[in-house]
Image (cartoon, rainbow, N blue to C red):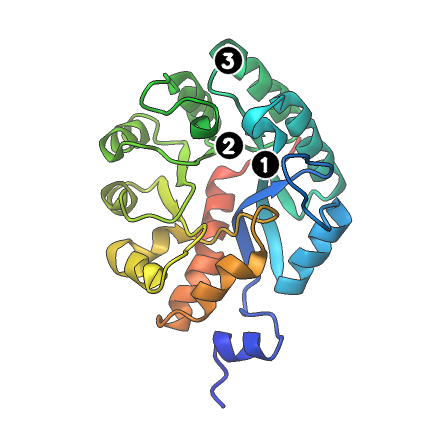
Amino acid sequence: MEDTILERARRGILPVGEEIIDTHSHFEPGFTYYHIPYSTDEAVVREMNRYGIALAFTFSFTGVGSDYTIGNDAIIRLVAKHPTRFVGFTTLNANYPQLWLGELDRCWAAGLRGIKLIPHYQGRTTANTDITPILAWADERGCPILNHSWDDPAKLRQWAADFPRACFIIGHASTDFADAVNRLPNVYQNTCAVLHKGQFEKMCQLLDPDKIIYGSDFTDLDIAFGLGPILYARVPDDLKRKVLCLNARRVVQEHVAPPG
């Protein structure tokens, strides 16, 4: 039997020689929008271990549509308890621009090293919200920004060019931003979550394979839901390793400042 990533995964062996880095996850025990079982930090780390996920970029649920300071505090506690397993992102609400920079400074001082934007769940979009103060803040620190959607490919290209030290992550699987992903060194495409047959293969055809990074959306979605289509994809193992680990490792090395 050929010892491929897929065959090892079928036998219950950690699926890659390199440990997986998950660049899209949510955490918050006691989240009340809907029930998420096994959502304590111990249970989440246990599930990460089960799938061989060494590190996860994570952000809060509460910050999506409620008090983001409570959600950010939960991420601060998680990162302080498991500093080698999580890169914490500060979640902001698009409706309160006057509070953005203060919250970013507070959370940075507490050890969070990225920014999560999700204006579409807050009654806004990046088309009708001036997010340049956030981008300038991120550019100054060279940190990653993951947005649920950047809306306008042309605007994303311009922002990435104007703020070259920041790292722009497209939050959900798409090929709409291919030009920015392929041309600009600081734009990455997340796989969260490849839903349709052949979708991941199409991404690999149209996007620079060095710029695609794995994301699961756990605990909102199950880890296996986003991992399976990559493991079963008809692409070479070397490409799978790039997507599951190596590309994100470069993001960590270049854009995630050590705590302290």
> Within 10 Å of the Cα at label 1, are there few (<14), some (14-19), or many (20+) other Cα atoms?
many
Q: Is the residue 193 above or below the residue 83 in the image?
A: below
* Mark linked to residue 96: 3
Tell me the amino acid under the disc marked 3. Tyr
Res. 116 mark: 2
Labels 3 and 2: the sequence-earlier one: 3
Mark 3 element type: loop
| Dot placed on the residue nearer the N-terminal end, 2 or 1 | 1
Indicate whether 51 appears above or below 69: below
Q: Quadrant of residue 257?
A: top right
Give percent across and percent down for residue 137: 46, 21
Residue in view at x 52 percent, y 15 percent: 101
Q: Residues within 10 Å of mark 2 (few under 14, many from 20)?
A: many
Residue 171 in the image: x percent, y percent? 43, 41
Whether the residues at callouts 3 and 2 have beta carbons within 8 Å, the answer is: no
Give the position of the C terminus as an image quadrant. Answer: top right
Separation (CA) of disc 3 from disc 2: 14 Å
Asked if the residue under mark 1 is in contact with the one under mark 2, i.e. CB atoms within 8 Å, the reply is: yes
Looking at the image, residue 102 lies above or below residue 78: above
Residue 211 falls left or right of residue 113: left
Mark 3 vs mark 1, CA separation in Å = 18 Å
Name which residue type carries label 2.
Lys
Residue 133: which disc? Answer: none
Snapshot quadrant of residue 126: top left
Residue beneath disc 1: 59
